[in-house]
Each structure stands twice: as C-alpha cells, then as structure tokens.
Image: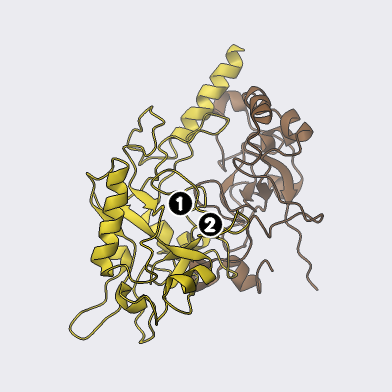
Amino acid sequence: MKKTLICTALFLAVLSTSSAQDPGLPDSEDIPSSHMTFFVTSEPIGDGGNLGGLEGADAHCQSLAAAVGAGDKTWRAYLSTQARPGRPAVNARDRIGDGPWYHSKAKLLDYLQRRLNRPLIKSEIHGDTLAEAQRGSNMTKEFALTEHGEIVNGIGDPLPTRHDILTGSQPDGQAFADDVDRTCNNWTSNSDGSAQVGHSDRVGNGNMSWNSSHGTTGCSQEELVSWGGVGLFYCFAVD
Amino acid sequence: MIARDVAHLHGDTIELARLGNNLTKRTGLTEKGQIVPGLNDYKDSEVAARATAAAQGNEWEYPRLTFYSNRHEVLTGSQLDGTAYPPELDYTCDNWTSNQDPDFESNGRRMGAFTGKPNAQIGFPDRNGGGDGSWNSSHGTRGCSQTALAMTHGVGMYYCFAIN
C-alpha cells in the first residue's frame, strides 16, 4: 500500500510540472471559477450577424460575464473586422490580450484526480509555427464551455447544433484582406453578407478549425441557424 | 473521409496544419465502426468507482476487462509530420519489438523518451488529450510493457491505412 501511495505521489508530481503556467488554482469547484478568462457565449445576441459592431459584441461578453460574477475582468469578443475606407482592419487575435486563458471550470478532475485544465496558449490556438499548427491546442469541445460551464451542443448532440462560432477571422486569427464580406459587414448586418465561423466542437466541414472553418450564406438569424449555429462567439479576458 | 491525402493528414503546410484534417472522434473508428473511448467517456458512476480503485495502481486489468474505458492512446512512434524520430532516443519500443519497462522505482514513472528508456510516441484518435489533441504525436508512454501502456490510457492500438 505504501508503495502504491509513493507511486501515485510521484505520478502526480510529474503531471503537475507539465502545467508551468498554472496560476495556483483554488480548491473550490464553483463555476465559473475565479480564474475564468475564456468562455463561449451561452446565448447569442439574437439578431443574426448584427452584433452592434465590436462594441456591441464586447458588451455582450461583459454582460454575460457579469451575470456569473466575472464582470471585474475586461472581456473582448474574438471577432475580426475588415478594412473600410479610413478604418483599418482589426484582427481578432490582437484584441484578446496575451493569455494563457482558462475556461469556467478551474478544477475539472478526472478519475485519477488530475486537473484537466491546461489553458489556451495564444500561439498554439493560432498555430503560429508549423509544429504548433500540426500539434494543435487544448481548444476542445470539453474546453470550449460557456460562462456557466456548459458544453456547447455540437455534431451528434441534441439539436439545435450551436457549434458555429462567429469569428470573421482567418485560421491565424487575422482579419481577411480580400473584398468579400466575412464579417456581416463588420458585425452590423442581419441580412446580406457572410460570417466566417469556427466549430467549438472541432468537428465539421472536413477540418478541425475552431476559428475559421467556413462561411455562412447570409447574416440573418435564420441563415446562421441553417448552418449549425445561433450566433455565439468566443469571449476572452484581456486582464 | 479522414484526410484527402498525406499532406492534409499531416498538415504539411502551415495553412493545412492550422485547419487540421478530418480525423475526429467520429471518424477515427475501429474496423467495426466503433468509437474509440476517450477522456471522460462513459462516466457511469459504477464504472467510475471501479476506475478509481483500479486506476490508482494503473492496472492493465482494468482496461482489459472494461471495454468502455479510456483507451485513446494510439501507437505511432512518429513525429508530428509523420516522419521517424532520430535514432538517439527510443520512440518506437525498439522498433516495435520491446515489451520492456524502465526502472519505475528510480525514475518516478516519467513519460516520454530519455536515454536508455523504452518508450513509444502516441497520438489520440479522439483528438482530446495531452493538452494538444495531436492524432499522431502528442506524448510518450511510461514504458513498453502492456501494463505500462495502460498507465496512460492506451492498450496498444494503432492506425491502419489502405494504400490502394
């Protein structure tokens, strides 16, 4: 028995060294945890691709965060906007601070009592190097939780599918540079246009992209729903 | 479809790699069409209780007798781009001929490769684990025996591809 305990202790010690950026997580299982710096909006704004621009989207993040007691952080929607006359493009990846980011469950334990909470690393989620892009990140269906700590329904889950997440971004987190609309007219259109979306469950369209899997055929709420989304987006805390 | 071609499968360009292939939990199936159980599957309380008791000793007996247990570590011996590792350290259980383990008492069951250690590089068909979800090269094992593979949720399965 003693031998077993020693082995277990060593086992845990080895695992703990793998999360060097672990900020020292609380014992509480409260959701959201005080360390939540990332979530998927539990509900959409509900007007298709019209989010009220980046300001409206950020306010939605802030409002949802505040409703669960995380309003003391500064929240940004992970959305890009495209260049317009006199207004340069905004890259989603440049809006969200530096991370690392933790989801709403600080301490999800598996049956070995290990904490499965490796955070999101900015360079990993965007695949900044070839090796990082090939390896992937911890952005999984189990990590991409709402501010309530709930899974976002994806492929294979009960309908409606909600896994299309608005980003308007390329896989590297930058805005599109061409003239085609990818952002529902910079998140002001609920009719014409298109939104680039990723999949929170990493399944769909023949790729695994969380932030840039495909575009929608329109920007109305009905068009978003027809593609497997409801207009959710990612929120990151910058501080 | 798992992948269009070898380049799509491995993400040979950074653009391909960022998008990823189509090897997911729903496509990375056995020859019988079964999903390979992964992290947090089958969290039935009875199963979980057995897992907790058995897994404290990291016993091969547990996954051997519990079909719906986590067994998502798939042997590859490969780097992310699908090429072999250089020869200095063992990533292939001595080219798939070894069932040996290192001395756990002295090295604390470290995962991965180091000098003189029997080890295999593994990936995840469910794309969930190791903090990265790599399908072919996420991390190493604790050793090369059947019991050592089971310590980190593998049972010694591997991917099969038809070449024609």
Give whichever of A26, B131 is nearer the camera.
Answer: A26
From the viewer's side, name the closer residue of A129 and B61.
B61
Assess whether mark 1 and mark 2 are in contact (beta carbons under 8 angstroms): yes
Residue drawn where x is 73% and y is 34% of the image: B63
B73 on left or right of A126:
right
Which residue in the structure is indicated by mark 1?
A144
Mark 2 Cα-neighbour bin, 10 Å: few <14, some 14–19, many ≥20: many
Give the letter of the yellow chain.
Answer: A
- The amino acid marked with disc number 1 is Ala
Q: Indicate the chain on which mark 1 is placed.
A: A
Let me know if residue B76 appears in the view.
yes
Q: Position of residue B52 (x, y in %)?
A: 62, 25
Q: Quadrant of the C terminus of chain B?
A: bottom right
Q: Chain of mark 2?
A: A
Residue sitting nearer the eye, A63 or B108: A63
Q: A164 or B124: nearer the eye?
A: A164
Q: Which mark is residue A201?
A: 2
Counting from the top left corner in percent of width and height, residue A21 is at 35, 42
Q: Residue furthest toward the top?
A: A2
Side of A24 relative to B88 (left or right):
left
Residue A96 visible somewhere in the drawing: no
Q: Which mark is residue B161?
A: none
Colour in which chain B is drawn: brown
The location of residue A55, given as percent across then percent down, is 23, 64
Q: Amino acid at mark 2?
A: Asp
